[in-house]
Amino acid sequence: MEFRINRRALLGLGVSGALIASSFALLSPATGTASSHREAPMISGDPRNDNTDVYAFVSPDKTDTVTLLANFIPFQEPNGGPNFYSFDVNSRYNIKIDSDGDAKPDITYQWRFRNEDKRGNATFLYNNGPVTSLNDENLLFRQRYTLLKITSQGTKTLVSNGIVAPSNVGAASIPDYGTLRSQAITTLPGDGKTYAGQSDESFFLDLRVFDLLYGGDLSEVGQDTLKGYNVNTLALQLPKDEVALKGNSKDNPVIGVWSTVDKKGADGFVQVSRLGQPLVNELVMPAGLKDTFNSISPDKDAGIPAVVNRVTDPELARLLQAIYGIKAPATPRNDLVEIFLTGIAKDNGPIKTDLNSQTLNKDAVKLRPSEMLRLNMSIAPSKDPNRLGVIGGDPQGYPNGRRFVDDTVDISLQVVAGAAQSGKLVDALAAGDKVDANDKPTGKTFPYIPLPSNKAVNQN
C-alpha cells in the first residue's frame, strides 16, 4: 500500500518555511513514541489534571454522530484505595472543537465537578457494602457534575446534576460495573449522550521505548505496559451537524478536536493540560518547553520558534539509523507537515475515498497550522479496521481522527522512518513494538471504551 503526501497542498497554504518549522516543532512525532502520560514536569505531579489521550471517530453503530473522548489520571492501579480516583473539583475539564480551521475553539464542552462525601470521621471506606446503582447508599463517596456548552452565542447548561460512575473497587464492592456505566450515560438535548466515569486504559504500547529505544536492539518489545491500568473518561456522542461549521456536516465535514484542563488558582483559572494528537508533548518537546505547551492554545503554536531543526531533521529518524541501520529519509522533512500540522489532502496515491471535497482531513475553510486531532466526519467507519490507519489504507483511522484500534506507536514509527516520503511501509519496522491491540476489545455501543479493571496490575 502506497501513501504519498501532496506537496502542492503545502505550497497552496501560503505558509512560509519558517512558520511551518516553528509551528511543527511543537507537534512533530520526531522524538516520541508514547502518548501523553506524565509528559511534563508540572502535570506529572498533578495526575487528576493530566490528560492522557483524546479519541475522535464516527460512531460505528450510529453513523450520523461522532464520538469524542478525553481520558485523565494515568496509571490508575485498580486496587489503589482507600482513596480512589476522582476528578478535581477545582478544575474545569474541556473538550474543544474547531469547525473552521482557525485553531480556535468554536464549541467548548466543559465539565465541572463537586463531591458528595459521606465518610466524614466515621470510616475510611469508599463504600460500606455492595454498590448496585449510582444512588446506592452504600457508596460513601460520589461525584456529580455540570456540563456546559460554550459558543460565541453564549453558554448553555446541558447537564446540571450528572453522576460520575465510581472507581471499580472490586467484585465484592461493585458486582456489575456495566450496570453503573449504563446508569451514568446521560442523554443530551438534540439526541446526544455523555459519560463521565472510570474506564480501561485502552492505549497500548511497550513503554520500554524509554530504555534507549526498546533496549537498543529491539529486544524490549511485546509487553503492553499499560495493561490492567484504568483512567477516568469524559465522553460525548454528538450529531455531526451540531459540531460542523454552520451546522452543515455535508459541506463542512472536517473538525479539529483537543482537550484542556483549567485549574483554579489565586488569580483565577489557568490552563495546565492540553492534548490533541498523541505522541506530542511527552517526548517531542524539550523539558524547558513542556509546561509551556500545556499552557497555550493551538492558535499560539505558530508563534513559538521552538526546536525548529527537530522538524526538518528529526532526532528519532537519526536514532533509528544509528542504532538499527534504518536509513534516515532525506531532509528537510516536509512530508510530516501535512500529516500533523495541516491535515491531509485527498486521494494521494491509491488511498481513495468517497468524498466530494478535495481533502482527507485538511481544514478547507480557514487554515492556521496548529496541533490538534483532525477528523473528517464524512468518511464512514471501516467494516474491517486496519490498525495502521491511513498508512495502512484505512482512511477512517489515525491520523484521520483516532480510534481505539489505531496503533499510533507503530504508525508514528513508520512515518518518522519515511513511510510517507517513500510511499511504502518500512519493512524493517514491520513488527513495531509487537503490541498491536488492546487486551480488551472495543465496546459495541457508546462510550465504546472497555470497562475498567478491578484486579491488581501485577495479577493481570
Image: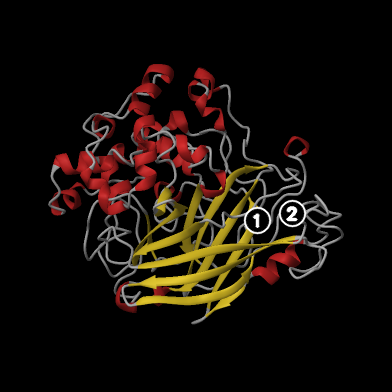
Quarter of the image where one finds residue 86: bottom right
Position of residue 212 relative to residue 98, above or below, is: above
In the image, residue 259 lies at what x, y percent?
Answer: 44, 55
Residue 8 against residue 328 in the figure, above or below: below
Kindly identify the residue that appears in the image at 29 percent across and 48 percent down: 341
The amino acid sitting under disc 1 is Gln
Residue at horizontal 22 percent and vertical 58 percent from the top: 367
The one nearer the camera, 369 or 87, is 87
Query: CB of mark 2 within 8 Å of CB of mark 1?
Result: yes
Image location (x, y in percent) of residue 187: 58, 77
> The residue under label 2 is which amino acid type?
Asn
What mark, if any, has residue 232 been given in the picture?
Answer: none
Q: Nearer the viewer, residue 263 or 420?
A: 263
Q: How is the image coloured?
A: secondary structure
Q: CA distance from mark 2 to mark 1?
A: 7 Å
Residue 243 coordinates in the image, percent (x, y): 39, 71
Q: Which mark is residue 168?
A: 2
Answer whether residue 275 is visible to the viewer in this image: no
Q: Residue at label 1? A: 198
Question: Which structural element holds mark 2?
Answer: loop
Q: Secondary structure at mark 1?
A: strand
Mark 1: few/some/many CA within 10 Å (<14, 14-19, 20+): many
Residue at 83%, 52% (x, y): give it: 123
- Depth check: give the residue in front, 170 or 42: 42
206 sits to left or right of 417: right
